[in-house]
Image: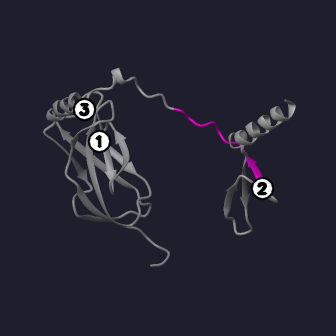
Amino acid sequence: MNKRFGLFAGILLIGAAPAFAEVYRNVDAQGNVTFSDEPSDGAEEVKVKPVTTVTLPKPADVQEPEQLRQQVEEEGAVYQSVRILSPSDDQAFHSGSGDVAFRVTSQPALQEGHRYEVTLDGQPVGQTASDTVTVRNVFRGTHEARVSIIDQNGVQVKSGDQITFTIHRPSVNN
């Protein structure tokens, strides 16, 4: 009986080992940082925060797709337009830091709880209830941007036309 218990306890400990795994950080002579689950010379142990969990809403609290679509259409119908005022479409400009200030507007003005969301090259880069979103350190080259209005739930209710702009930045190569 004791042998079986010892075998069972050993299997449980082996199975639980990944849950208690430690992480080690090592910096080599060239400054490259690596992480591993095995200690090495000069490595320091990293304290890993617990995993964040998310509790999903109950099915009864989730709106049906048709109900949600109708709500979005009603909210979007309030706005005649939404657009980027600056930079203008096809504009090219210099920015040493790479900062781009997007000025946006809508007709009529934003309703309470709504925000502007600017996307750059298809990725959301900022939200605001005012008329300006500043994006820092944009790479040189040509980019596409768009502004949308999102509601208090983060759902897009109206989207403006896409603009294209080119940013010039100094380079150590040029």
* Callouts 1 and 3 close, C-beta under 8 Å: no
Question: Residue, x 69% and y 44% (percent of image)?
Answer: 18
Q: Amino acid at mark 3?
A: Pro
Main structural element of the magenta stretch: helix, strand or loop? loop
Mark 1 or 2, nearer chain start: 2
- C-alpha distance separating marks 3 and 2: 51 Å
> For mark 3, does the 10 Å Cα neighbourhood hold few (<14), some (14 to 19), or many (20 or more) residues?
few
Element on which disc 3 rests: helix
Report the residue marked by disc 3: 65
Residue shown at the point (46%, 73%) measured from the top left: 171
Q: Nearer the viewer, residue 6 or 53?
A: 6
Three-letter amino acid code at disc 2?
Ala
**Real-space Cα separation, disc 1 to disc 2, in angstroms:** 48 Å
Residue 43 position, x and y percent, is 77, 55
Q: Which residue is mark 2?
A: 43
Query: Which residue is pictured at 28% across the width and 26% down the height?
Result: 63
Q: Is residue 92 above or below residue 65?
A: below
* Quarter occupied by residue 107: top left
